[in-house]
Image: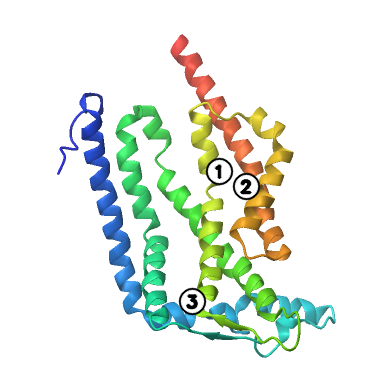
Amino acid sequence: MADVAKNPDEMSFLDHLEVLRWHLIRSVLAVVIVGCVAFVMKDFIFDTVIFGPKKMDFPTYQFFCKIATFFGITSEFCADELPFTIQNRTMAGQFSAHIWTSIWAGFIVGFPYVLWELWRFISPGLHVNERKHSKGFIFIASLLFFMGVLFGYYVVAPLSINFLGTYQVSKEVLNEIDISSFIATVRASVIACGIMFELPIIIFFLTKVGLVTPEILKKYRKIALVIVLILSAVITPPDVASQIVVAIPVLLLYQVSIYISKLVLKRDLKKAAENAK
């Protein structure tokens, strides 16, 4: 193993690669270990989590059903069951779904540890004050990621499944959804929202390196809106409702990012003024 106690200024490029390699190895091992636990917990992962949005007693459907009932509106959210079945059409389909779902579960649950390993790699290259002001990085980044995961699971995924699972071009065509397609819809909604909720963290680091300023963010706000809508269309299932639902919180996070960018610049200017004295 590389000597990680070396002074970062004295390390060669190959030394840095060696250190990065071990951080990546530990991250992958953490994901695999958590994935193995998820593999053993097959019944909970699939019956409760993955196939939860297919059941009409899912909290999201119950919530919208109560709203529709309050306003006296007939809604598909109040149905007894969704009009589609999930099937497997390949010999290794279910086993493959089990393996990959376990790996993705390992990544989601192990995300804070992966971030910690990333932080251990980049923190030696930061100044003491930068490390001090970035102590909450792992907690905040993990919190935003899990907020995005929950938003994707409880909002985007069920709305997408309800819309796409009930959509029919003709009564002659039955919806018999392949297991890989169903899992991909849930996975895309969860992972994509988790990553998109990291926008404030991304803006923070882009501001720190001087690539972004509040003025730039304000100037290109309209362009950002278009980009967000395009990204929403790419990462979500092809229905307008899901795209709009994803776009709204991301635009709110964009506004928060402008405020964060202002704070970063204000802090840097204050630090520069203190050093000039």
**For the residues marked 3 and 1, what is the alpha-carbon distance in whole angstroms?**
28 Å
Q: Dot 3 corresponds to which residue?
A: 49
Packing grade of label 3 (10 A; few <14, some 14-19, many >=20) is some
Residue found at x 62% / y 52%? 231
Q: Is residue 240 left or right of residue 263?
A: right
Note whether 14 is above or below 198 in the view shown: above
In the picture of the structure, the residue carrying the numbered disc 2 is 253
Residue lying at 37% horizontally and 79% vertically, measured from the top left:
95
Residue 135 numbered mark, or none: none
Q: Position of residue 222 (x, y in %)?
A: 74, 40
* Mark toward the start of the polypeptide (2 vs 3): 3
Name the foreground residue: 13 vs 145.
13
Q: Nearer the viewer, residue 18 or 92?
A: 92
The answer to whether one can see residue 59 in this image is: yes
The residue at which mark 1 appears reads as 200
SS of the residue under disc 3: helix
Is there a contact, CB below 8 Å, between mark 2 and mark 1? yes
Q: How many marks?
A: 3
User: Which image quarter: residue 265?
Assistant: top right
Q: Earlier in the sequence, mark 2 or mark 1?
A: 1
Is 174 on the left or on the right of 106, as rendered? right
The picture places residue 155, in percent across and down from the top left corner, at: 63, 67
- 11 in relation to 40, above or below: above
Question: At numbered mark 1, what does the secondary structure look like: helix, strand or loop?
Answer: helix
